[in-house]
Image (tube, coloured by chain):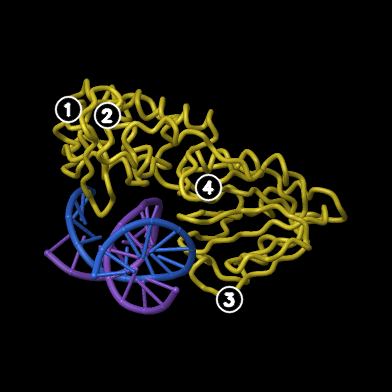
Chain colours: A yellow, B blue, C purple
Amino acid sequence: MPELPEVETIARGLAKRVTGDVVESVWLGRKKEPLKSSASAITKALEQRRIAAVRRMGKHIVFDLERVENGVRSGKAATGAQWIVHLGMTGRLQVCEPQTAIDKHTHAILRLSSDRELRFVDPRRFGRLSVAPAAGFDAGGVEPLEIELDPFLKLFTGRKTPIKSALLNQKLLRGVGNIYADESLFRAGIRPRRRASTITREQLGNLFVAVKEVLKEAIALGGSSISDYVDADGREGFFQLEHRVYGREGEPCKACKTPISRVVIGGRSSHYCAKCQK
DNA sequence: ACTATTTCCTGGATGC
DNA sequence: TGCATCCAGGAAATAG
């Protein structure tokens, strides 16, 4: 389940592999769920465009595209576009040789001028493909690694929703998902059910630090590989080894040995230590 | 404006 | 062994 650190890792890997390549043609599958923009809009935005950059915004992967004319850049920004990929739960972007067997759940294939293919595969179809005008994509929310303390505190003032739900709300912070919300709350010593507005300024300050720490550490370790997550080069991440609460229900807290609790908040399982988190 | 709930989807795990 | 059921979860839609 790719969240910010996994998406960052994937985007960096893809940037290395496909930046500068040109999309010669596009094939899209018949399933409609993965397409947030129309098939024709996606095809039109991608074909005969050079991939100028690949980067992450929240949990989205953004491909900046520029028009190719006679093999050279047009230079006119307005002729560009963006291809936006959200991996959902099980989405993967693979760069492979054209002869590589096509996975059953392949929804898009981009033929590249380097005689390779960029494929979007997603069994569960929670992932989404869309296009936007050049520099036009709005991912909503603020990047957690860029936000400063005061705006961070303001995100939560007056909110009655549980802090866990607020952390998952992409319109506030973008990129934090279930794993990193639980891990951040553990490090900050805050129970996931606490109403955001009731949390002290000091505790929110701890959360501010915790969110950034957790995300940075996870990026450094290539993300968390649970279920079958691998990055663009097929490598697993290692942050799952650092999880202190996520997926550890009943196991002893690494700080105090109390068994880790699991509750459901907003339909999401939430893990915490009842002794370390208040 | 905000909050809570439901829905989408399939593979793997679990239960009988 | 086989079949049914449950669960994972991001975000959009819906309802209040």
Measure the C-alpha gap from mark 2 to mark 3.
47 Å
Which circle, 2 or 3, is nearer the viewer? Answer: 2
Q: Residue at x 43, y 42 (%)?
A: A175
> Residue at label 1?
A275
- In the picture of the structure, the residue carrying the numbered disc 2 is A253
Which chain is disc 3 placed on? Answer: A
Q: Where does label 3 land, which residue?
A: A30
Query: In the image, what residue type sits under mark 2?
Result: Cys
Q: Are marks 1 and 3 in contact (CB under 8 Å)?
A: no
**Of A166 and A90, which appears nearest the observer?**
A90
Question: Callout 4: residue from which chain?
Answer: A
Asked if the residues shown at circle 4 and circle 1 are in contact, with their CB atoms under 8 angstroms apart, the answer is no
User: Mark 1 or mark 3, which has the lower sequence index?
Assistant: 3
Q: Residue at x 63, y 70 (%)?
A: A28
Q: CA distance from mark 4 to mark 3?
A: 25 Å
Give the amino acid at mark 3: Arg
Is residue A170 rendered to the left or right of residue A203? Answer: right
